[in-house]
Image (spheres, rainbow, N blue to C red):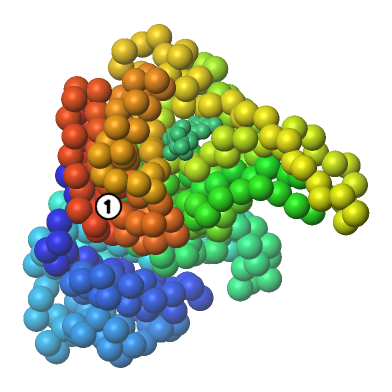
Amino acid sequence: MSESMERRRIVLGVTGSIAAYKAAELARILVSRGYEVRVVMTQSGMEFITPTTMQAVTGQPVVTDFWDKSEASGIGHIQLADWAEALVIAPATADVIAKLAMGFAESPLLAVALATKAPILVAPAMNMNMYSNPKTQENIEELRKRGVRFVDPEEGELACGWNGTGRLADPEEIFFHVRRILSPQDFAGKRVLITTGPTREALDPVRFITNRSSGKMGVALAREAFRRGAEVTLVHGPVHIKVPGPVKREEVTSTAEMRKAVMDHMESKSEMPDVVIMAAAVADYRPAEVADLKMKKSDKTPTIKLVENPDILHELGKSKVDEKKPILVGFAVETGEIEDLLNEARTKLKNKNADMIVGNFANEAFDLDTNRVWLVDKHGRQEEVATTYKSRVANKILDTILTL
Ligand code: CTP
């Protein structure tokens, strides 16, 4: 199930932290992606950012106290609680977290939190010692037990001068979590291992053989699987990628390293991924020898001897003992005709004992934000996904995985 395009309704709670200015950025992101945002601020929140700013960003009146007779409170806290499809509190202070845990209703924000049936997402921001204080952690645990979700604060330099965990998560990161709490969790409880990007095979300390893969398809798969509730690990080659914090990242360089990273996940039966998606453009060959020192120009043109790399997907397919686990998905890249691509996909499906092969063309896939693919699965199904954003292609792939 892909994300619906209708306007989603978010109540954004802003409390008294130096990070409150980032709430404006979060509101901007939400509004720009088509969400309707109503802001509720605490008194101390207003010490750090003005309601005028939040009103300007959201285009909606801001609720600041119970007794305000202006238009803003025309929508009372109970109505707001019912209207919300999600309540996001960012930044959330230690104080508001404690009050949420206790069930207080002394401010409009706390009253909305108490009255709403919508999912609640809390992004804490505070001094590191306040965050790690056992009482704060107990409050967080208590709220988690009640189904409240958290976007963990980041580590770094804090406004108070300390260095540690307590900095509000990046607004883009919070946004990923907002999408997640609004999405059907059809991948909940599933472990998904995704590889992406190129691998790099060294020739000498300064040169290597690689390919044009940008890793974007695998990143889209990781983000969307996370949004749909999966526990995601992304093994990626040397590319710059941005994925939500809870997605575990393992960076590798060579094919041998990628193979090891993937195989390490296969060791324990109980921790084995439910799905492995090999979206990486793995180098099929590597130089037979890697020079210790930089190769020098000489009169003779050098010849590079290549040897074959291990085929990770093939190895996974061969060692697969259980029909159902892990589901193996591979990619096939072609530069020829559609018929060649489909033949190639079917051959790989069989040879590598995969459950599905995603076929695509190099010129439509590499380094682009869009792709056109063919999904060829072990049940003989063959479906074209017309050119669209990689996030949508990713959701199509994930939809199909659920049917395998
Ligand atoms: N793959 C792998 N290990 C390799 C090579 C490829 O796991 N050493 C995986 C890729 O991640 C991809 C699929 O196998 O999922 C692609 O297979 P490959 O045989 O390399 O196909 P192409 O590169 O598309 O085509 P060709 O057969 O021309 O190499």
Q: Position of residue 174 (x, y in %)?
A: 39, 61
Q: Position of residue 351 (x, y in %)?
A: 39, 20
Which residue is located at x 21 percent, y 69 percent?
A: 35
Compared with residue 209, is residue 70 higher up or lower down, i.e. above or below? below
Which residue is located at x 51 percent, y 48 percent?
A: 197
The residue nearer to you, when weighing 142 against 120, is 120
Please indicate whether residue 133 sits to the left or right of residue 145 in the image. right
Q: Position of residue 191 (x, y in %)?
A: 39, 31
Residue reaching furthest top? 321
Which residue is located at x 80 percent, y 39 percent?
A: 290
SS for callout 1: strand
Q: Is residue 404 visible?
A: yes
The residue nearer to you, when weighing 79 against 242, is 242
Identify residue for label 1.
372
- The image quadrant of residue 357 is top left
Q: Position of residue 339 (x, y in %)?
A: 25, 39
Please indicate whether residue 359 sits to the left or right of residue 382 in the image. right
Please indicate whether residue 294 sits to the left or right of residue 26 in the image. right
Residue reaching furthest front? 300
Q: Three-letter amino acid code at disc 1? A: Arg
